[in-house]
Image (cartoon, rainbow, N blue to C red):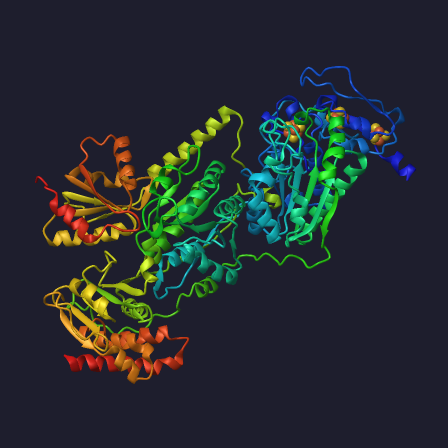
Amino acid sequence: MTSSLTERPKPFLVPEYCKGCGRCIRSCVKDCFTLGAQINPETGLVPISLDLTNCNSCGLCIDACPEPYGLRLAGEGDEAAERPGHALELVAAPGGIPEPEPWPDQTVALPDRQPLFIKGTYAAALGALLAGCRHVFGYPITPSTEGAELMARVLPTLGGIFLQAVSEVATVNIMYGAGGAGKPCMTFTSSPGFSLMLEGISYMIGSEIPAVFVNVMRGGPGLGNIGPEQSDIKLACRGLGHGNTHAIVLAPASPQEMLDLTMLAFELAFKYRNPVVVLGDGYLGQMTGKVQLPKYMVVPGIPRWAVYGDRSHRGNLICSVELDPELLESHNFRLNEKYEQITSAEQRAELFWCNDADILLLACNTPSQIAKGAVKELRERGHRVGLLRPITLWPFPLDRFRGPLHRAKELVVVEASSGQLEDELRLALSHAGTPTPPRVTHVRRMGGILPSQSEIVDHVAKLEVVP
Amino acid sequence: MPSSVFYRSFDRHNRGEGVNAHSTTYCPGCGHGLVQKYLAQAIDELGTQDRTVLISPVGCSVFMYYYFDVGNSQAAHGRAPAVAIGHKTANPGSIVIAYQGDGDLASIGLAEIVSTAQLGIPITVIFVNNAIYGMTGGQMAPTTLLGQHTTTTVEGRGLFAGRPLRMAEMIAGLDGSVYVERVALYDNRRRVHAKRAIKKALGLQVNGKGFAFIEVLSECPVHLGLDPEAAEDWVRDNMVPVFPLGVKKDITDGPNYPPIPSPRFDPDETLQAIGAGTTREARFAHGFAEHLDPEDISLKLAGAGGDGAQTAAMVIARAAINEGFDSTLIPSYGPESRGGTSYADVHVAKHQVLSPAAPRPHVLVAFNAPSLARFGPTVRTGGIVLYDSTVVHAVPSALAAGAIPVPVPLTGAAKDLGTPLVKNVVALGALQAVSKLLPEESFLTALRALLRDKPAMVPVNEEAFRLGAKLALEEH
Ligand code: SF4
Ligand code: SF4
Ligand code: SF4
């Protein structure tokens, strides 16, 4: 034993990296350490002094030293002490920090199938599965739960994972982990649950983690009820937690779009390294409709930036902390550039009978379907009415709406909220400096009630359009 | 020995300028540095550096990713175990470590740590308990001792602020944990123990065992207002009596945590899993029922729960979709579904259903008098009002002008067939016969598809359908 000890190297002290805490003093039975006397000007600390005369190489002092490079065995990495200056590339141990290897997504063609007749929440779940999502986390909340239940049933048959978390707060943070590892992951939630997830969404945006949130909105505020409302447009478009945050917000209007837009959501989430919100309403979640499956499915890879937990991705970091204000500001500038890029590239909308319209309706989700019914009825009565249907609520697709807006005299916002969609419109018009926007009026219902076709028709019929 | 698991240069630490490249952010004598040294050494000795994902917490050790040359993820305050679940399920081959302080783990993150430990997923949690909030400047922690002075317990922690929380014991009491030990750092012997425990906990994950939890009693000399040596003594003399050291649980000879699945992406398997049929059903219709509406026909089926309005609506919609039309179905929604009424709005459209609601239906099927009274007046001119004449004796006078009443004894007919449940199928037969919405075979094909799992029920359903048609035609 003694001989093996003496063969071991003795400790090596690098005074610059010693904080002079003195924890080594008591650890050494040979009293090799004494308090130092000279201040290190760079740190303002007083390094310990080490005299190895009596040292038996027991190594106990090294285990007592909190500093990785303060006290260590001689010979190991001594050159680190000599390392000059700095470079913003992490320097790893011998062997180096690995370069991430490409691991791209693949698409696989699907045969033509009979259309399905399924609920909107189910359709969203299928969209996620076909987008390559095998990691679903969630907390049950009506009226979104059926999507999660379907996932819980189907995922085990595909080697996937459905995990019911302890809360929505835990859910979003599990997604932070799985998304940070580079896997497509998603959750189903509804308004109160979405509120709880906002903090985590802010972290995901800051850390640039992709994930998909399907929020089947219900009546609020507070516990409200489980009826359909468009109560979270404000949160999704303007209030994704703290900080300068944005995420693409997709607003499906049919079970088919619940599938298509959820699939698209995954594509966009990974394209921009950002969460994407699919905002449905309670009615859409429950509505059963015809759903045609897509022509392909996705087999996801692992992105280069992911912290996957293998050699190839070892050098990566998922993080939203940046103490240096300048660096944090430039991170924000970069995020803002991303938002601008999204704003110019990802505006999506449907124009329904807008070519010659004097009166435009603006609506999304189920209210837009009801508005379409109203457009048809009003057209039959001879009114020149059309519908602007934003499919992305953020970015608001004003570019798509400019032509019809230029022509129209009246704009009627139809929504199941107290003006959250109208606010998005007004903000977009204001930013764009639209010179003479049409007069804006509205048909609004709340509390779990959608505007009805007859309410829209009556409202429009009363408008006096000057030809 | 600086373990190779530490970066050679801490370039994330103030850009690695000067001594920052090789020294930590911790105050002199802080226990964090020791724990992390042992952790780095364990990772090195177990050979898991490439596979390791380290979750940094919020608190003094927020910047562990400055030092550890492994995959790094930085979590929100208290959420490290949740983030760890995400990483572990995303890649079961990764070795995931959640490192947390006492405010992080035992206060704001209690729900996450308790639920994760109960889940038992194989991750390793290192819990550094120094009885105080370090980073925010010396406030009370859940583990602060009674009588201990902090900036939020200036007179010393009293009972009004609660008693110190013993996490190791709590975690040991949960079913999912396989190994729980509390260790300390105040002398050579404890440090050797601590080192061993951390390596053991990590090794258990490497072997797929289960959830392991190491609580380390640590020194925060700065906020204790003591020099590092005195802080060691303080931990020994004050913390250990409240937080006894030792193994709290060891069931590591038990079974491993079940294997975490690996995703599969076979297209056929995927389609089968989501219930996508392989073939298109035969079609029977020769065109859209334009005699009802040129483009979009709406129907309302209304009754009490148990009348089968939803199922009948489903048959209509499926039949329409099989024929290549668009269709939607909205069930009764909200509290009314509990109040006993059950109704469904169905649309069948040549191309696309616009508004899915049916405020003015072309066809109403009413299974009882209240439904007929409520929705009868909404049916459009020339529309069909089919109702159960077994239970409705007088047609309400308010029935929309021009609507065609079709009384059919639905309940009676179903009883005659010996299966009262098929009342809704009698209604479907009658509906088909008087409306010609779709051909008879379309309905029957959809009906059979719906009964795929109950083939014995097919004959009586078909009989009910035909009887309904016959009765309706007799009435006309
Ligand atoms: S190796 Fe042992 S004897 Fe030598 S200085 Fe360190 S503690 Fe003292
Ligand atoms: S324990 Fe390490 S940092 Fe502290 S005085 Fe000794 S050598 Fe210096
Ligand atoms: S404040 Fe306390 S816990 Fe934090 S680094 Fe300093 S000594 Fe360590």
* Image coordinates for residue A329, horizontal then vertical, percent: 46, 27
In the displayed structure, would residue A348 be above or below residue A7? below
In the displayed structure, would residue A213 be above or below residue B30? below
* Image coordinates for residue B458, horizontal then vertical, percent: 35, 80
Instruction: Write the residue at 40% across / 52% down.
Output: A263
The one of B313 and A339 positioned closer to us in this rendering: B313
Query: Residue B442 is drawn in which quadrant?
Result: bottom left
* Image coordinates for residue A208, horizontal then vertical, percent: 48, 39
Q: Is residue B9 visible?
A: no
Q: Is residue B361 left or right of residue B443?
A: left
Count of numbered marks? 0
The one of B235 and B80 positioned closer to us in this rendering: B235
Q: Quadrant of ligand 1?
A: top right
* Image coordinates for residue A8, horizontal then vertical, percent: 85, 35
Q: Is residue A330 left or right of residue A32?
A: left
Q: Is residue B184 left or right of residue B265?
A: right
The one of B457 and B270 positioned closer to us in this rendering: B457
Q: Residue furthest left?
A: A467
Q: Is residue B124 visible?
A: yes
Q: Is residue B167 left or right of residue B272?
A: right
The quadrant of the image that shows the C terminus of chain B is bottom left
The quadrant of the image that shows the N terminus of chain B is top right
In the displayed structure, would residue A65 be above or below residue A178? above
Query: Residue A24 is drawn in which quadrant?
Result: top right
Instruction: Write the residue at 68% across / 38% down.
Output: B5
